[in-house]
Image (spheres, grey):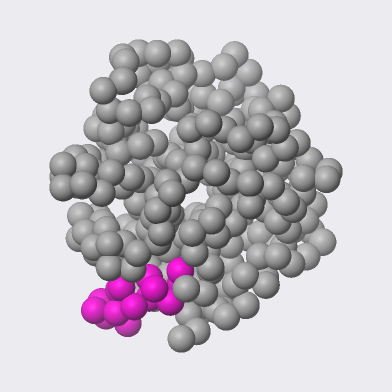
Amino acid sequence: MRVTLIDAHHHLWDLNQNPYPWLQEANEPHFFMGNYDALKKNYLWPDFEKDTSAHNVIATVHCEAEWSRDDQVGETKWLTEMHQRIGHPSAIVAHAWFHTDNSDEILARQAAFPLVKGIRSKPVTALKPDAMQCKLPGSMQDPKWLEGFARLEKYQLSWDLRVPYWHLAEAAEVAAMFPQIPIVLNHTGFPWDRSAEGLAAWRQAMETIAKCQNVWLKVSEFGLKDKPWIYEDNKAIVLEALSIFGIDRCMFASNFPVASLRIDYNTLVTSVAHMISGFTPKEQNDFFVNNAAKFYRLSISN
């Protein structure tokens, strides 16, 4: 099965030339898939092309990969130069803090790059549901964070939302406050707890944020800490997520190379394609191509 698709979320990095502390220093102790030593090597466009060769990838969206926060625009410059050389990636989701004093300056600089369509800025979150606190600096309840977030409208940028599911009710409040700002939830809302209770909490959180029509969903990254990638388990997650959001607000995204810790690209794409085979051909094509193109304002011929 050869699938035509837009990959709405992937990363590239050159560890010889550019600063990625999480990949060049000691492992982050709370990384959601555990040990990630296998990622600590260059991952450049030829590597991505090799991984994706079984499918027809017609466009890609590069999502910020935690380039050193001392130089938030550096990654955008590097990717823009790459695009000028080889025509890839097709679009960039860049980084900017919302709660810092220079937030407006960084947002303006990022927005000046034509490839930049959105911002991923991870708010302060709790490691587990029972550790949540209110109004921490840098959190989605921080007035200064909200002030910075509001500037996305001025710069016509979307927000890539990446938080654990126990913060989705909080994120829904933000989405409702700013209905004019497009938001896309990363990684299927991170259904990490696959117990009956955990899935019920994830489901309730997803239903809460899906009520906000400005929130879309990246169906991506089902990897779990120290556990294999299981088709039937992940199929249930995918179909439930599509049911909650509606396939018209959902898009495929690989999260490569991070997802490669659990699965290869071909198996990922063909698995998801089989999972959604019950939808109409138009719905499947929208999921794999048109929805990402619409959300990220990509010009494509399909």
Residue 169: tell me if it is visible. Answer: yes
The relative height of residue 284 versus residue 133 in the rendered view (above or below) is: below
Residue 276 magenta-drawn? yes
Q: Identify which residue is drawn at 27% across, 62% down.
A: 233
Q: Looking at the picture, how far across and down is residue 16, in whole percent?
A: 83, 45
Q: Looking at the picture, how far across and down is residue 222, in whole percent?
A: 39, 55
Q: Which residue lies furthest to the bottom in this view?
A: 1
Q: Identify which residue is drawn at 48% across, 80% down.
A: 3
Magenta stretch secondary structure, dominant: helix
Camera-side residue: 107 or 59? Answer: 59
The relative height of residue 120 versus residue 47 in the rendered view (above or below) is: above
Residue 147 magenta-drawn? no
The relative height of residue 89 versus residue 29 in the rendered view (above or below) is: below
Residue 273 location, quadrant: bottom left
Q: Which residue lies furthest to the front in this view?
A: 226
**Region of the chain picked out in magenta, as a range:** 268-282
The relative height of residue 117 versus residue 86 in the rendered view (above or below) is: above
Residue 158: tell me if it is visible. Answer: no
Residue 250 location, quadrant: bottom left
